[in-house]
Image (cartoon, rainbow, N blue to C red):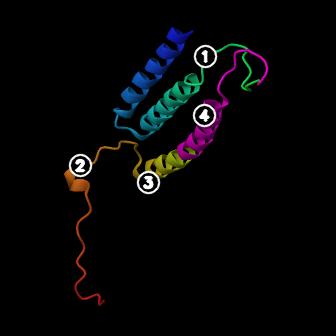
Amino acid sequence: MEFLVASAIGTLTAGGVYLILRLRAFPVILGISMLSYAVNVFLFSTGRLAVDAPPILQKYADVPYSDPLPQALVLTAIVISFGMTAVLVMFALGAYLEADHDRINIREDDEPEETSTEGQGA
């Protein structure tokens, strides 16, 4: 089971890095999401990979258990990543509607010129 989880983490990380390097807005958002899923699976696996083990430590019984702290961290991370993904999608959608493309490369001639503040008063 450890090999399967490690392979999933590696595949998600490789796919996420590949999509981030695409220089388009929506693949970058998808790549960031895949990286966050890889981190979540990694955090989840730190709590022990045990099947049918309760997340509660029983004081008087010697039964295997899974650590509930990584599960709580992953749940919090999932909620935060959904919110951040929604914000990024809205930013990308606004940029796409304004510029009619989703490329994120910035050329030197696209940078805004410095505005002069002379004559505007203090």
Q: Residue 45, image x and y in percent? A: 56, 22
- Between the C-alphas of marks 3 and 4, the distance is 36 Å
Q: Is label 2 in a helix, a strand or a loop?
A: loop
Q: Quadrant of the N terminus?
A: top right
Q: Nearer the viewer, residue 42 or 69?
A: 69
Give the secondary structure at mark 4: helix
Badge 1 element? loop
Q: Position of residue 111 (x, y in %)?
A: 25, 58
| Mark 2 or 4, nearer chain start | 4
Q: CA distance from mark 1 to mark 3?
A: 47 Å
**Mark 3 or 2, closer to the camera:** 2
Residue placed under numbered mark 3 in the picture: 98
Q: Residues within 10 Å of mark 3 (few under 14, many from 20)?
A: few
Please check the rendered image and state whether residue 83 is part of the magenta-colored stretch, yes or no. Answer: yes
Q: Earlier in the sequence, mark 2 or mark 1?
A: 1
What's the amino acid at mark 3?
Answer: Glu
Q: Mark 2 = which residue?
A: 107
Mark before the other along the chain sequence, 1 or 4: 1
Residue 50 is covered by the magenta coloring: no
The kind of residue on which mark 4 rests is Val
User: How would you classify the magenta stretch by its main secondary structure?
Assistant: helix
Which residue in the structure is indicated by mark 1?
Answer: 49
Cα distance between the residues tagged 2 and 1: 48 Å
What residue type is disc 1 on? Leu
First in residue order: circle 3 vs circle 4:
4
Mark 2 is on which residue type? Arg
Which residue bears the numbered disc 4? 74
**Secondary-structure class at tag 3:** helix
Q: Which residues are magenta?
A: 59-85
Crowd tier of the residue under label 4, counting other residues whose Cα lies within 10 Å: few below 14, some 14–19, many 20 or above: some
